Amino acid sequence: MTLPDQTLESAFGEKSPVRIIPHDLNLENLVLFDFTNDNPELQEMDVSDTKEFTRYIFQKLKEQSSRVGIGKYDENRTIYDKSAVFDSSGIQGQRRSLHIGLDLWVAAGTPVLAALNGHVHSFQDNRAFGDYGPTIILEHQLKGISFHTLYGHLNRKSLENMEKGLKVRAGQQIALVGDIHENGQWPPHLHFEIIRDLQGKEGDFPGVCALDQRDRYLSLCPDPNLLLKIKALENL
């Protein structure tokens, strides 16, 4: 069921900020990462070297005495050059490079919480290099509107007792953030995404699109900050 963005935005606007990790993101000292061509530091490293990229992320957090880094929504990134997973999919043969979720760069083992009441729609271990790794998709109803939230880069134990249809409560722990050997070969983080229409997919949905498909995917996947309400992102 496809619904106007404004209807979804209105429903989210009535909600208090939701938590998808235990930390209050409006009280934390956040690091806002830049994964675009404007960041010269990225040009000095091999982002396909997961250990090197991980050292970079967590050194930045350490320097600012932070537990949480933010990877922004609607950001045209260079870091996806690391994997063939992001090869051309656009109308003009463009590689996928536009991030359509929000990343929380945190320590492996950080609990992952359900954003809202709902149930497990599907789950899957997307094992390709550069992919999501273990992934959970929840289905929700809010003000009569049906939509989904996706949680990617989890640890494998998160899927062991998972069942389709399993009911979850807002704030309930559903998973743990995975380490590099199990999360698709990324520095530990949670990819969070809102999806209006899964288009028949299960256990997976694009978290990155080609630039020539930007309008379509930003409509399908509205800004996660509609729910998270992180003040540091409001004026970007």
Image (tube, grey):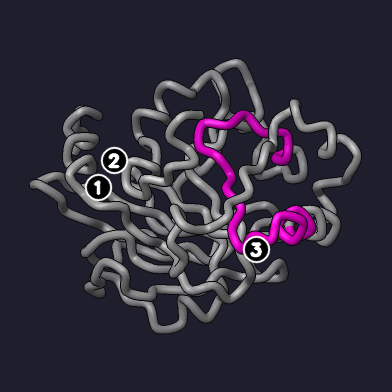
Q: Residue sitting at 55 percent across and 76 percent down?
A: 156
Mark 2 and mark 3 lie on one chain; the one further toward the N terminus is 3
Q: Residue sitting at 60 percent across and 16 percent down?
A: 92
User: Residues under labels 2 and 3: Cα distance?
Assistant: 26 Å
Q: Is residue 176 left or right of residue 217?
A: right
- Three-letter code, disc 1: Phe
Report the residue that reaches farthest toward the left.
144
**Is residue 45 one of those drawn in magenta?**
no
Name the residue tied to disc 1. Answer: 147
* Residue nearer the viewer, 181 or 126: 181
**Is residue 66 one of those drawn in magenta?**
yes
Name the residue tied to disc 2. Answer: 196
Q: Is residue 216 visible?
A: yes
Q: Which mark is residue 188?
A: 3
Crowd class of label 2 (few under 14; some 14 to 19; many from 20; radius 10 Å): many
Give the quarter of the figure containing the N terminus.
top left
Determine whether 15 is above or below 181 in the image: above
Magenta part of the chain: 58-80
User: Where residue 187 sits: x, y (%)?
Assistant: 70, 59
Report the residue that reaches farthest toward the right.
44
- Three-letter code, disc 2: Arg
* Residue nearer the viewer, 136 or 24: 24
Determine whether 61 is above or below 119 in the image: above
Q: Nearer the viewer, mark 3 or mark 1?
A: 3
